[in-house]
């Protein structure tokens, strides 16, 4: 029974992933430097119709004015009134500035600043912030099925260096994977107690809905965390995510057009849910892009209105 339930749960997860996941692994993508990402962007553009949501949102370089408003779901939505994360702060630096993806709802900006400050006393000098959202959210030309509402961000598992990186470094520098080559566990030569503390701080933040990490990281947390394990259920295993983690905030208060995700199942997620990720089934090839690209008209009307020129 358990096995059946597991299989059906995973099947629906796969079905969702088939619809939503892009061509290569998220891990490979976020490591891309500027030239690699630009080349793939061009290759993708060549295949897309004019009204493809990825094309239209991916080529829009400015936000709309007004209050921050996430519209739709994490994987089919957009953001009006986006705010740009400052490239530098006392305890953060925004990476990959050439991508123009450091936009978000004010709640995301506030969360990142809060986490950056909270991490410092625990030995995490500062955050290297990866992709957040595009200026109007929406699907991206490269990488990420989600990140569309402006309430999600990638954060590198590499601590911030003790100096300001220049723009070239931010576009070119690679993060370090904390997962062993065989994918079975963390790489003990890289993994530090500070990684665990940073993930705990993030998971305990009241704005956070869930956090995605590589299954090997979840396995390490399940083994290492003692005392109050109540935050562990918010840490969810997913493909890739070996050198960054992905924070997904819940819909901010008052965001009436933001669609919440189903609540997480109870429990710390350290049992059968986690074990599945280390079975042969989990090693099957990842789903690829669906044949029919999402059009702007497939998104909520309010999203289409964000990118349609006024007549
Ligand atoms: Zn992400």
Image (cartoon, grey):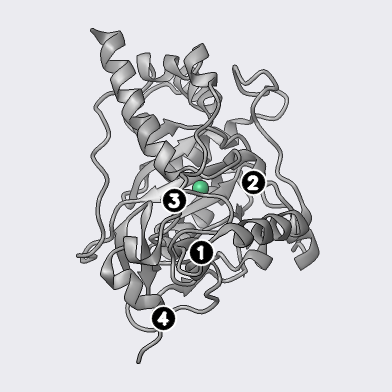
Which quadrant of the rendered structure holds the N terminus?
Answer: top left
Cβ–Cβ below 8 Å for labels 4 and 3? Answer: no
Label 1 residue SS = loop
| Depth order, front residue of 95/283 | 283
Q: Is residue 121 above or below residue 229?
A: below
**Disc assigned to residue 292:** 3
Q: How many marks?
A: 4
Residue 69: image x %, image y %?
31, 70
Q: Residues within 10 Å of mark 4 (few under 14, many from 20)?
A: some
Q: Residues within 10 Å of mark 3 (few under 14, many from 20)?
A: few
Residue ID for mark 2:
29
Residue ID for mark 4:
64
Which of the marked residues, 4 or 3, is nearer the chain's N terminus?
Answer: 4
Which of the marked residues, 2 or 3, is nearer the chain's N terminus?
Answer: 2
Which dot, 4 or 3, sits closer to the camera? Answer: 3
Cβ–Cβ below 8 Å for labels 3 and 1? Answer: no
Which dot, 1 or 4, sits closer to the camera? Answer: 1
Label 2 residue SS = helix
Residue 240: image x %, image y %?
57, 34
**Disc assigned to residue 114:** none
| Depth order, front residue of 296/245 | 296
Task: Tell me which residue sits at (43%, 16%) in the image.
Answer: 276
Between the C-alphas of marks 2 and 4, the distance is 28 Å
Residue ID for mark 1:
49
């Amino acid at each position: 029974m358990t096995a059946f339930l597991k299989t059906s749960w995973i099947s629906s997860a796969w079905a969702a992933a088939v619809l939503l996941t892009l061509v290569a692994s998220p891990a490979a993508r976020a490591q891309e430097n500027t030239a690699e990402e630009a080349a793939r962007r061009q290759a993708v553009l060549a295949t897309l119709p004019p009204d493809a949501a990825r094309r239209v949102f991916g080529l829009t370089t400015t936000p709309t004015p007004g209050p921050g408003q996430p519209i739709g779901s994490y994987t089919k939505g957009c953001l009006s009134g986006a705010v740009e994360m400052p490239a530098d702060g006392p305890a953060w630096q925004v990476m990959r500035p050439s991508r123009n993806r450091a936009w978000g709802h004010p709640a995301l900006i506030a969360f990142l600043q809060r986490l950056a400050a909270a991490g410092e006393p625990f030995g995490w000098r500062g955050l290297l912030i990866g992709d957040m959202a595009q200026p109007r959210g929406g699907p991206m030309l490269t990488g990420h099925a989600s990140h569309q509402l402006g309430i999600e961000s990638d954060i590198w598992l590499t601590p911030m260096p003790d100096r300001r990186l220049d723009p070239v470094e931010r576009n070119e520098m690679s993060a370090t994977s904390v997962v062993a080559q065989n994918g079975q566990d963390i790489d003990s030569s890289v993994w530090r107690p500070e990684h665990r503390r940073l993930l705990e701080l993030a998971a305990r933040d009241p704005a956070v809905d869930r956090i995605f990490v590589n299954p090997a990281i979840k396995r390490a947390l399940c083994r290492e965390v003692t005392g109050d394990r109540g935050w562990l259920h918010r840490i969810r295993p997913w493909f890739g995510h070996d050198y960054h983690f992905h924070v997904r905030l819940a819909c901010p208060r008052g965001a009436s057009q933001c669609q919440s995700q189903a609540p997480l199942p109870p429990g710390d997620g350290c049992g059968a849910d986690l074990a599945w990720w280390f079975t042969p089934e989990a090693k099957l090839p990842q789903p690829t892009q669906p044949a029919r690209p999402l059009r702007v008209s497939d998104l909520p009307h309010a999203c289409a209105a964000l990118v349609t020129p006024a007549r």
